[in-house]
Amino acid sequence: MLPGIDGFEVCRRIRRTDQLPIILLTARSDDIDVVVGLESGADDYVVKPVQGRVLDARIRAVLRRGEREANDSASFGSLVIDRAAMTVTKNGQDLQLTPTELRLLLELSRRPGQALSRQQLLRLVWEHDYLGDSRLVDACVQRLRAKVEDVPSSPTLIRTVRGVGYRLDAPQ
């Protein structure tokens, strides 16, 4: 047990700014603890006691997944998202995105063509797990569109899905 803070909160704080691999090694074995740990952003959850070889294999597996994701880049027309460098370019020019705008674009780009609800985006990007004000999502999408769209008032990349949320499409 950590003094003054639990591992779940440490995990949440790390995820706000970084995507480094996280494995929670804990004595807490209840199903709800496992769910909370993974929902907090952990890549794996290991209950003590654990054999050294098993922990070593889990570490290697998490690192392999991270390598595949880190080497991943995606193109959406003239927009290129480089997940390894955590950069976004449009027509070869670097875009200056805020950390929140970058996280939003990364989440949308991980699921191209899939509509994500405002609640999903609140949970994935802001790590809010409550029925809050979805205007936060709408405002960030509007700022992001101003940077990535050719004509922000007629978006072709970040599309609104009425009654649901948003999706990232490749331009026609």
Image (cartoon, rainbow, N blue to C red):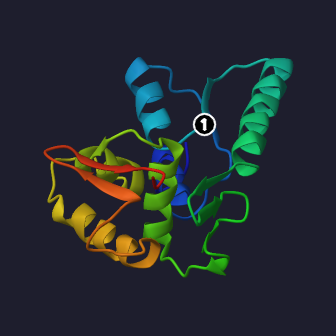
> Is 66 situated above or below 145?
above
Residue on which disc 1 sits: 43
Which of the 4 image quadrants contains residue 117? top left
Q: Which of 17 and 134 is in front in this view?
A: 134
Residue 14: percent from left, percent from top:
56, 58
Crowding at dot 1, Cα within 10 Å, few <14 / some 14-19 / many 20+, comes out as: many
Q: Which of 1 and 172 is in front in this view?
A: 172
Q: Which residue is drawn at 47% across and 45% down?
A: 8
> Is 165 situated above or below 56?
below
Image side of residue 61 versus residue 39, left or right:
right
Q: Which residue is drawn at 48% across and 51% down?
A: 170
Give the quadrant of the N terminus. Answer: top right
Label 1 element class: loop
Q: Which of 131 and 79 is in front in this view?
A: 79
Q: Nearer the viewer, residue 166 or 127?
A: 166
Residue 134: percent from left, percent from top:
18, 58
Q: Which residue is drawn at 61% across and 31% down?
A: 44
Q: What residue type is labelled 1?
A: Asp
Image side of residue 136 versus residue 52, left or right:
left
Q: Residue at x 24, y 50 (%)?
A: 118
Residue 21: percent from left, percent from top:
68, 45
> Is 85 situated above or below 60?
below
Image side of residue 45 versus residue 35, left or right:
right
